Image (spheres, coloured by chain):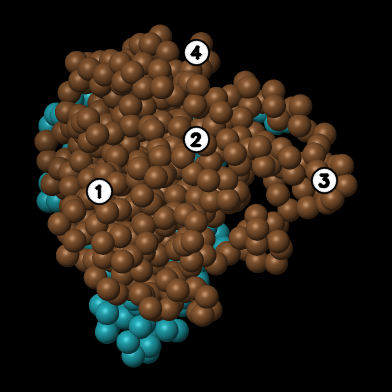
Amino acid sequence: MLQAGEWAYSEKLKEHFMNPKNILQGENTDDFDGVGMEGNLQCGDQMMVVIKVDKAKEIITDCQWKTYGCASAIASTSVLSEMVKGMTLDDAFHISPKEVALELGGLPDHKIHCSVLGDKALRAAINNYYTRNGQEDKVKQEQAKVICQCMNITDHDIEDAVLEGARTYFELQERTKCGTVCGQCKEESEALLEKYKHIHFGA
Amino acid sequence: MADMKVYFDHNATTPLHPEVKKEMIAGMEMFGNPSSMHAYGREARANIEDARRKVADFIGAKENEIIFVGSGSEANNTVLSLFVCSSSQCIPGSRRGTIITTKIEHPCVLETSECLAHQGVRVKYLNVDRYGKIDLDQLAGMLGDDVGLVSVMMANNEIGTLQDIDAITKMVHESGAYMHTDAVQAVGKVPVDVRKLGVDFLTISAHKIYGPKGVGALFVKQGIPYCPLIRGGHQERGRRAGTENTLGILGMGRAVEMRMIEMPEEEERLLLLKQALRKGIEESIDDIYFNGHPTDALASTLNVSFTGVEGEAILLYLDLEGIAVSTGSACASGSLDPSHVLLATGVDAELAHGSIRFSMGRETSMQEVEYLLNVLPPIIKRIRNMSTAYIKGGLHATSR
């Protein structure tokens, strides 16, 4: 007979969950150069990332955070805060959820969506830094593009659906109602579905 | 590693009672097919019928009203599925095509109901109040000559709230419909007598009462129309095909027998533990809410919501301390929605994500409750310290 198995998580994730790094203590964020927050409590995940920046070099010198969420949310914000220290703002801006998951030694599929908010909150913090420092021109908005005109479904909606478990066009339609009226966006939606499956799950 | 191992998840499943284990070990080599006429078969048959007598006695039924099945879920599926059978012998399905159930049932009832709705059955769902009690006035308004079956769970698995099944059954019968109750969490914890309740169908599961997994029983009142879910054999008098799970049934019989002995004095003890747990949490942790009915509920079940904390994180930190609980959080279940039961009672989604169910059993001790009360407050404090919900603006941040 087998003994109790390990958690559904990697050892590295477990370590970051048990001993999270760089938690923002207290409420005060005045000492930080950029503040970003994503998610909401109703959905069960919310993350806040604050950064200190070496302004001459545009390098992140410190990154702290708070997270409301499950073990993978806590661990992914913790590991992200370690990853970005010493990174240029530009490099940090382009960290993907997949890189965070890799750094954690992988995440179960149904937990990927818990970990995507950390990098979003980080980008929000970087944009916040640019705005505060009169560099609005550098602010990169994550502009959503409407794919399904009938149901007003954007590429972000499709990405979210993939993160939440949609793997086939049918499942995508079930979740988003994308392409359920005229159906003209089918090809583009399917291409995006494949793209996001590849980005997030390497499928 | 944790120095103590404490099991606070008895509503999920229970350990085998030592007496059940003994009985099953003794019966392990009994392999005969109960349908066979030779000695091997007769031995198995005798033991199955003995268990049937015990189960029937335990709930005040006749032996021929007990059908052994593979699980509580199977029993519930069987009862609800009576309604799509178009055979002329299945009276309920043919004339009265509406089913009434509640929003807080086990998924095996809710998902079967949804499936039936796709097949043309009308399904109506009763609301519950903040304590998880159904509204009898709403039921009265829904009942009519189109309603064939009403299915209301006796004790809720997540919050422990008990429904007034006898009063509900009276109303249902007056309208001419049949009454089913999923009593999986009630049988063996509170007295259940099918005659007093008056129900037509009642579901029991063995593994919730210190019996083995993979066996349950469905009570079907004599004379009530019935149609098997699993066909193709004469077992259980043609009502449930498949060679009987002799060993499981043997264990179930012993489990109910032990419940008969132990249950009467257990409730008071569990109530004291629950009060101590409730009081201890109240005194040591701020910003909490208790879910479920304050008095009309299982003595073994306490469900608490902790603001600003996600349930899976609590569950896993408790696991590291050797304590087993369950949560209504979406994250732990693999779905995206938190507990449908808590949402139905009007609990805010955030609070539902932060809910923990403590369910105690026959071996739970005051020492274990005290250990839990020592371990829990620092865990909640620790998670809150890293939670956005405890900073300014945390509640009103941008939505995803």
Question: Above or below — where is B349 with respect to B276?
Answer: below
- Crowding around mark 3 (Cα neighbors within 10 Å: few <14, some 14 to 19, many 20+) is some
- Label 2 resides on the chain identified as B
Dot 2 corresponds to which residue?
A: B58
Question: Are the residues under badges 2 and 4 in a single subunit?
Answer: yes
Q: Colour of chain B?
A: brown
Of callouts 4 and 1, the N-terminal one: 4
Q: Which numbered dot is residue B167?
A: 1
Rendered residue at 57%/45% (across/down): B63
- Label 4 resides on the chain identified as B
Give A154 or B268, whichever is nearer the viewer.
B268
Dot 4 corresponds to which residue?
A: B4
Q: Kindly report which numbered mark, 4 or 1, lies closer to the viewer in this rendering.
A: 1
Of callouts 1 and 2, the N-terminal one: 2
Q: Colour of chain A?
A: cyan
Provide residue B175's location: percent of width, then percent of height: 26, 65
Give A124 or A58, whichever is nearer the viewer.
A124
Quote the CA–CA distance across marks 4 and 1: 44 Å
In the rendered structure, are the residues bearing label 1 and label 3 in contact, judged by CB atoms less than 8 Å apart? no
Provide residue B281's location: percent of width, then percent of height: 25, 20
- Label 3 resides on the chain identified as B
Quote the CA–CA distance across marks 4 and 3: 45 Å
Asked which quadrant contains residue B18, the reply is top right
Residue type marked 2:
Phe
